[in-house]
Image: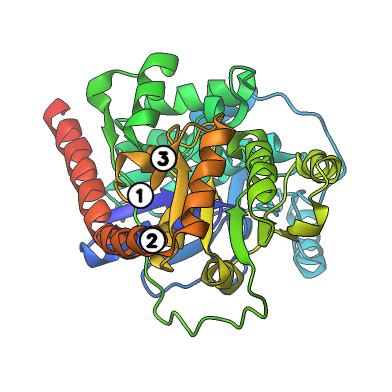
Amino acid sequence: MRVLMFGWEFPPHIAGGLGTACYGMTRGLARNDVEVTFVMPHAYGDEDQRFVRVVNASDVEALFGSVDSGSEELLQKMSFIRIDSNMVPYVSPEEYAEYHEKYVRTGQRVWEHGDVWKRRYVFSGKYGANLMEEVARYAVVAAQVARYMEGRFDVIHAHDWLTYFAGIAAKRVSGKPLVVHMHATEYDRSGENINTQTYAIERAGMHAADRVIAVSNLTRNIVITKYGVPPEKVVTVHNAVRFAENQGAAPERGLDDKIVTFLGRITYQKGPDYFVEAAAKVLRRVPNVRFVMAGSGDMMNHVIRRVARLGIADRFHFTGFLRGDDVHRMFQLSDVYVMPSVSEPFGISPLEAMRSNVPVIISKQSGVAEVLDYAVKVDYWDVDAMADAIYGLITYPALSRMFAAKGLEEVTNLKWNDAAAKIKAVYEAAIAEQNNRK
């Protein structure tokens, strides 16, 4: 089976769990005899391509002037605020000279397609101010990729709202079934104060898809109730965790204090303020504890100010955003990992912590709570319960060892190969349904 997959990020260049999930998933699919071509807006060239072929959308020439109606319709639905950016069509000076000479000599347009001009867009692949425009242009490039790869893929797979228009465009060009993956909804990111444009893209993508994969039953319920997607079309496939090929020795700690870690975006969704309040309560009972907040986000300044007001700044450490081996080393240094998310569709980071033999505390409002028995579960808003759980794990060694050992055993059974087998079954169902309609 061959899959044309659209994503937004891929290790080692990631901004969160989406890229990590895509990497584990593509490795698992390869081991299930699924060949994946992974298209992303901006590739750096150092991605691990042993199990997947990575296509850099910034290298793809898209046709303009006679754009297929599907892509044109998508572009018309988008509104843009123009800003100065590097995302402009370009040709090299040598190409321009050659084409200009041909035009002067023959009177023909510079390209070989009549009135059609080719353009190449340089995508940043970031989550910046021109994100919506990049999402729309990505759809145009996706249509061209699908046209170029005609006959060389069986199904299309698009990850999260950033790539849904790309998936729709590829489906319209190729006629192949579309599977969209919902890793996080706009309700998870923003609560009830949703961005209506993002919501509209999510809804359009899921309704255009032949199947929707949700990363948890929590997410599946949101997809059905908030977006009106038919239940029979939505399948839950929980994420997994990949064990590093070389775990490496634990780094030297250099102190005797216990270390409690938060790792994630410092945004409303991840509940960093509840972590701070729980930390203050713990420090009133146990002074020799250090709290680490690893990440970055729009609540960073708010959190720093709150830590200062609580008088715990000497016990709090902000590392900034961590990636790759630094994440693994941070887990190895930790005695407890806390994920106090307000709304977490799944949450891979607790699995990564458990893989490093660290006991974890997670919010009941997380998808990963559905698959873990040996994690302490609290309501995100219950800072007293969170503080009690932290206190128990750092004060009673036997309790900590039990959760760490049982957690490691539990997480060892959550393999990407098994998750990928379920995803492959979703592909097969989508293909079979389309064949039955013909």
Above or below, 255 against 134 in this view is below
Above or below, 350 against 101 in this view is above
Q: Are marks 2 and 1 in contact (CB under 8 Å)?
A: yes
Instruction: For marks 2 and 1, give the CA distance.
Output: 9 Å
Residue 429 position within the rendered picture, expressed as x and y whole percent measured from the top left: 17, 38
- In this figure, which residue is indicated by the disc labeled 1? 239
Numbered badge on residue 377:
3
Specify the amino acid type for callout 3: Lys
Q: Nearer the viewer, mark 2 or mark 1?
A: 1
Residue 66 visible in image: no
Which residue is found at the position 33% from the left and 61% from the top?
402
Which quarter of the figure is the C terminus placed in? top left
Q: Earlier in the sequence, mark 2 or mark 1?
A: 2
Query: Looking at the image, how many numbered discs can be counted on the residues?
Result: 3
Which residue is found at the position 35% from the left and 36% from the top?
216
Specify the amino acid type for callout 2: Gly
Which residue is found at the position 12% from the left and 30% from the top?
436
Q: Going by the picture, which residue comes out furthest to the front?
A: 285
Instruction: For marks 1 and 3, give the CA distance.
Output: 18 Å
Residue 29 position within the rendered picture, expressed as x and y whole percent measured from the top left: 28, 59
- In this figure, which residue is indicated by the disc labeled 2? 24
User: Mark 3 packing: few (<14 Cα in 10 Å), some, or many (20+)?
Assistant: many
Q: Nearer the viewer, mark 2 or mark 3?
A: 3
User: Mark 2 packing: few (<14 Cα in 10 Å), some, or many (20+)?
Assistant: many
Residue 88 position within the rendered picture, expressed as x and y whole percent measured from the top left: 77, 48
Where disc 3 sits, the SS reads: strand
Image quadrant in which you'd find residue 58: bottom right
